[in-house]
Image: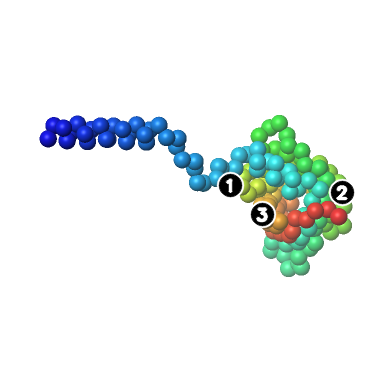
Amino acid sequence: MFVRTITILVVLTWGASRVLSEPAPSPTTPPETTLQDNDRVFQETLQGAVLQGLFSVRGKELPVQKERYEIRQVTKQPEDDYWVLMTRVQYGDHDVTVPIPVAVHWAGKTPVITVDNLTIPGLGTFDARVLLHDGLYAGTWRHGDVTGNLWGEIRPAK
């Protein structure tokens, strides 16, 4: 009985040392995307892009209107989450090119452009939340007491 117990202990010890000395298996799930990866993809998506679509005015019996945003330059700011989008804005009878400072917050890998009480020369003061995903954009906006929705496609500028 004693020899059998010793033999079992030796086998268990040998087996445990082999398991502990082997390298851990590599993970089967991909590593999580870093913020730097998100920032890079955000910049590559918008640099030279055109957001073209429609907007509605909440509570008004108006047809939807066309809008177009030509993003000419995308620059990350030193502060966390802040960017400046040099943008040509076209809607209604407005056509201006202005730097638009925005905050970009992340819902996983999905960027949400955030504007709070931003005065854009020639256009007015706005709030907005615009989600970008899979070549599309959608969101809400406020200009004074007027609110609405916006949506459309993200395409390379021609």
**In the image, what residue type sits under mark 3?**
His
- Give x and y (percent) for residue 6: 19, 31
**Pointer 3 residue:** 133
Say which quadrant the N terminus sits in.
Answer: top left
In the rendering, at what x and y percent does residue 19 appear? 37, 36
49 or 19, which lies in front?
19
- Mark 3 vs 1: CB contact within 8 A: no
Circle 1: residue type: Gly
The image position of residue 112, as x and y in percent, is 65, 48
The quarter holding residue 136 reads bottom right
Q: Residues within 10 Å of mark 2 (few under 14, many from 20)?
A: some
- Say whether disc 2 or disc 3 marks the residue closer to the N-terminus: 2
Colour theme: rainbow
Q: Amino acid at mark 2?
A: Val
Say the numbered circle drawn on residue 108. Answer: 1
Label 2 or label 1, whichever comes before in sequence order: 2
Q: CA distance from mark 2 to mark 1?
A: 33 Å
Q: Is residue 125 visible?
A: no
Nearer to the camera, 43 or 125: 43
- Circle 2 sits on which residue? 96
